[in-house]
Amino acid sequence: MFAAKRLGKELTKIHQTLPPGISLVSADDYKEWQMDLRVLDANPLYLNNTYRLRFQAPEVTFVSVPPERTVPIHPHIYSNGIICLDLLGTQGWSPVHNVESVCMSIQSMLTGNTKNERPPGDEEFVRRNTQRPRDIRFVYEDATV
């Protein structure tokens, strides 16, 4: 019940206001929300692109909705949409985070990126991974991107 109450309050807030570049696409229930995300600066890697995030608490992934929504290319984002970001892992997730703050963190991660590349081993990871994002034990060692 507490989770439903919290999500209800969060959804009400989201309907009222969101930071620039972030918009609610759907939140038909408390199980899955979809948000669109744009990078607002002139980063040529993401200029004029909008990306779709799927929140299935506590998991957050990018989803591809061809042809207009693709998974962004970033050294910490696998081509299947799984995001390697410490605040999304079991050690980083806390009640302080909400949909808006996670979107802003991912937006910031994209804004600061200058590398047009996937994580090392992306193809192999995508082919072999059978774990849910929250069960993957990422090693967070590269804070430069």
Image (spheres, rainbow, N blue to C red):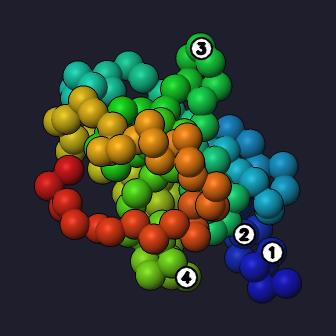
- Give percent across and percent down for residue 87: 42, 70
Of badges 4 and 3, nearer the viewer stands 3
Q: Amino acid at mark 1?
A: Ala
The N terminus: image quadrant? bottom right
Kindly identify which residue carries mark 3. 67
Kindly identify which residue carries mark 4. 95
Residue 51 visible: yes
Q: Amino acid at mark 3?
A: Pro
Q: Amino acid at mark 2?
A: Leu
Kindly identify which residue carries mark 1. 4
Residue 14 visible: no
Disc nearer the start of the sequence (4/3): 3
**Residue at left offset 33%, top offset 37%:** 118
Of badges 3 and 1, nearer the viewer stands 3
Helix, strand or loop at mark 4: loop
Marks 1/4: CA distance?
13 Å
Disc nearer the start of the sequence (3/2): 2
**Residue at left offset 52%, top offset 42%:** 126
- Give percent across and percent down for residue 37: 48, 38
Q: How many marks?
A: 4
- Give percent across and percent down for residue 81: 53, 42
- Give percent across and percent down for residue 27: 76, 50
Helix, strand or loop at mark 1: helix
Marks 1/2: CA distance?
5 Å
